[in-house]
Image: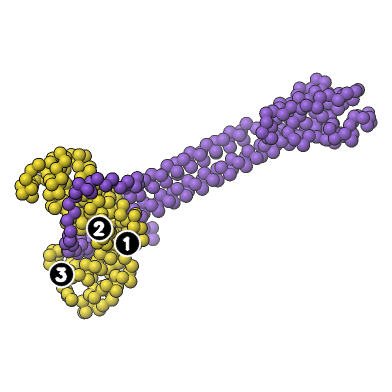
Chain colours: A yellow, B purple
Amino acid sequence: MSPPGSLTEAPDEQLVLLSKDGDIAAFNSLVERYQRHVFNLCYRLLGQREAAEDATQETFLSAYRAISTLAGGSVRSWLLRIAANQSKDELRRRGRKDQAGSLDQIFDNLGVPIEIPDGARQPEEIAMNHQVSQTLQLALQRLPLEQREAILLADVHGYRYDDIATMTGASEGTVKSRIHRGRARLREILSPAGELLEPSDRQEGQTR
Amino acid sequence: MAFFTVLRGRHRWFETNVDAFADGELRGAELTRFETHLASCRACAAAVREARGMKSLLRALPELPVTRSFAITESMLRTPAPVRQPAARGWTGPIRAVQGMGAAALALFAVLVVADLGGAGAGSIASPDGDFDAVPANEDVSTTGAADIGAPQGGDDDAGAGDPEIAVPEATPGGGNVEGAGVDPPPPLPDRTGGGLVTDDRGPPDGDDASRVDRAHDAGDAETALAQFAAEDGGGADWLRVGQVFSAGLALLAAAAYVGMRRRTA
């Protein structure tokens, strides 16, 4: 076994090789490296912290048991693929009905309207307070799971359509359609929020 | 109106590719086509801005902090892995099942239609000129028909006018072995009571009227058999119709389910 200190900087390929030999410490270095990404995907898919934590733990357990099947490629993509499947299993266990946010919840959550930013603005320029992110999360919960998954992988995790197709087992055309419909649906859900106030009442970057 | 319908149809390609363009996923000829269109379509230009805006909003979602470690331990690994439900990814499995069901229903429908057409072309089994042509024309029995059953020739009451065994046609399918002078027995009828072919166990009656009785018996059995064949033929056709309607309905149901599933997953 390798000394723990050297593992934190080891490249993914080396950690995977050690993990295949049964080195749990090496695998846990991968866990430390990617658990934030895995947890966030699970949370955005499931909408609940407790469920997301269960799915995250199951993801890493499954990944360790299946590490021998990993033959090159991105470890992060591989883990996120497992995470998406585990999240779907978690949804099945808990019942999908619990996950959809109601429109009332969305409107109750609004302190400020969600203004969909102009396309030229960078994400870091967009002020997002807790309430806005909550509202956006509730809106995401109202999407069908497949659309939600495709949008999160594309927009939050930055994957291209062909990678998303591989990760989800769908065709590129289906991925494109899911993203198109998912974003359109999000706009529909969020647009009444903007219409609640007069245009003059809307202020850019308003925070609470 | 048709012009605008066509126009709307052509524009649909651009509408469905707005997000792909905004994400930089279009290539080659598709990219050129979209860019050319964008130069003159304000609606699509606005849609592209909206798509990029939504993308920026989602990318700005804050990353949630992890409040515990998800490192695995030996004891966790000793717990058996949960059996993952053998479901297909998303709707792929159900969609394929529906496709299979629809294909099977269409195949069944086609087979039933062919069977129906084949049965109609072969002619009616219940034709009175079928198996019963074996009754020679010069035999009185060919003209006796049902009306003469129970009214034996020569007015001999002993011929069984009131004898239910002889005068009354059999209620059950039967009349297999018919004895009579020069008469070919009709083919045995299938036994619906679950046994094998039913044969006539009564045997020839005694006495001079045996031939007349036999002829009356033949006529009764012939008529019974005729009625049975007609019923069978009609019943068979009915079942074909029912099967056709059922399989067509099943195919339509599968098609509707398929369309609904594709819309939901797309």
Q: Are marks 1 and 2 on the same chain?
A: yes
Pair 1/2: label in front: 2
Residue placed at 33% from the left, 67% from the top? A102
Q: Check residue B40 in the rendering and tell me which mark sits there, or answer none.
A: none
**x, y percentage for residue A199?**
23, 77
Judge whether B32 appears above or below B112 on screen.
below
Identified at 80% across, 20% down, the residue is: B182
Q: Position of residue B178 (x, y in %)?
A: 78, 25
Q: Residue at x 24, y 75 (%)?
A: A111
Q: Are marks 2 and 3 on the same chain?
A: yes
Whether residue B107 sits left or right of residue B94 in the image: it is right
* Kind of residue indicated by mark 1: Gln
| Residue with the mark numbered 1 | A99
Query: Which residue lies under the disc numbered 3?
Result: A127
Which residue is disc 2 drawn over? Answer: A52
Relative to B242, B230 lies left or right: right
N-terminal of the two: label 3 or label 1?
1
Kind of element beneath mark 3: loop
Q: State the image quarter where residue B264 is shown.
A: bottom left
Q: CA distance from mark 3 to mark 1?
A: 26 Å
The residue positioned 20% from the left and 46% from the top of the image is B74
Tag 1's secondary structure? loop
